[in-house]
Image (spheres, rainbow, N blue to C red):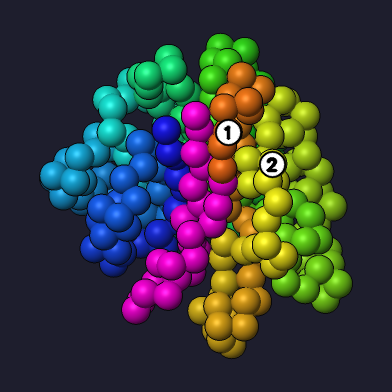
Amino acid sequence: MKLATWNVNSLSVRLPQVLAWLAENPVDAIGLQELKLVDEKFPHDALQEAGYHAVSFGQKTYNGVAILSRSPVRDVVRNIPGHEDTQARVIAATLDTAGGPLRFVNCYFVNGQAPGSEKFAYKLQWLEALHRWLQAELQEHARLVLVGDFNVAPEDRDSFDPVGLKDTIHHTVEERAHFQSLLQLGLTDAFRMFEQPEKSFSWWDYRMLGFQKNRGLRIDHILVSEALKAQVRACHIDRAPRKNPQPSDHAPVVVELG
């Protein structure tokens, strides 16, 4: 079974690239972030033709998340229950797989703008709400995968310039502590279960030849619960779509479970 995550940075713009990637990489399920479209404009027909059931949680211009799955989805949750929020950032669903029900949680984490800003305070509140909810989800669903654009580089090796970017957004002590708190819930960073090339990143700025110079960050992650950890066979970042004309600034991350 293969699962993936990809911040597409506008699904309406990137739909042909998503369909092409899925044709070449027929994953069982994928979480998409930054749809930047309302649910009424979600391309269900095109994705159904590609073989995917889809559920979305969109909004105009910003944010938006979706789950595409080869198998039907059920028990869909949109947004963090009990956390009042106007931004479409979280969607979760249960997938019926050969190994049993799998809870698939897809999130577009808050960016946070800059430490000390109102948006950073909102990010920390949102992270706390997510942690509380995931704790409950894990008690209910032993087989759980958390995917998404976390907007956090967990360690110095996840940044092209950890010294120059120290204490800036994505690199702060507070953000990294929240990432560690997710691991303390019993989740594991699938990418770091394996030896990986140095300077492995999933996002590169469009400006200043960011991709060409590999000036990137690893901020897109797949975390697996303890019940799934032994089944993880591989995890990689697929840089190929970042080479496309008019690409997303993020690359897909793929995990394989046996």
Camera-side residue: 235 or 124?
235
Q: Residue at x 42, y 33 (%)?
A: 1
Q: Is residue 17 placed above or below 206 in the rendered structure?
A: above
Q: Residue at x 58, y 16 (%)?
A: 142
Q: Is residue 54 visible?
A: yes
Q: x and y percent of residue 157 in the render?
A: 77, 61
Camera-side residue: 13 or 211?
211
**55 in the magenta segment:** no
Camera-side residue: 184 or 118?
184
Q: x and y percent of residue 64 in the render?
A: 40, 49
**241 in the magenta segment:** yes
Q: According to the image, label 2 marks what residue?
A: 193
Q: Residue at x 37, y 21 (%)?
A: 97
Dot 2 crowding, Cα within 10 Å, few <14, some 14–19, many 20+: few
- Asked which quadrant contains residue 189, the reply is top right
Q: Going by the image, does 42 lie left or right of 75?
A: left
Type of amino acid at the residue the image marks with label 1: Val
Q: Residue farthest to the top?
A: 140
Type of amino acid at the residue the image marks with label 2: Met
Q: Residue at x 49, y 65 (%)?
A: 239
Q: Is residue 69 placed above or below 253 in the rendered structure?
A: above
Element type at marker 2?
helix
Q: According to the image, label 1 marks what residue?
A: 232
Tell me if label 1 and label 2 are in contact, CB under 8 Å: yes
Residue extent of the magenta highlight:
235-258
Q: x and y percent of residue 48 in the render?
A: 17, 41
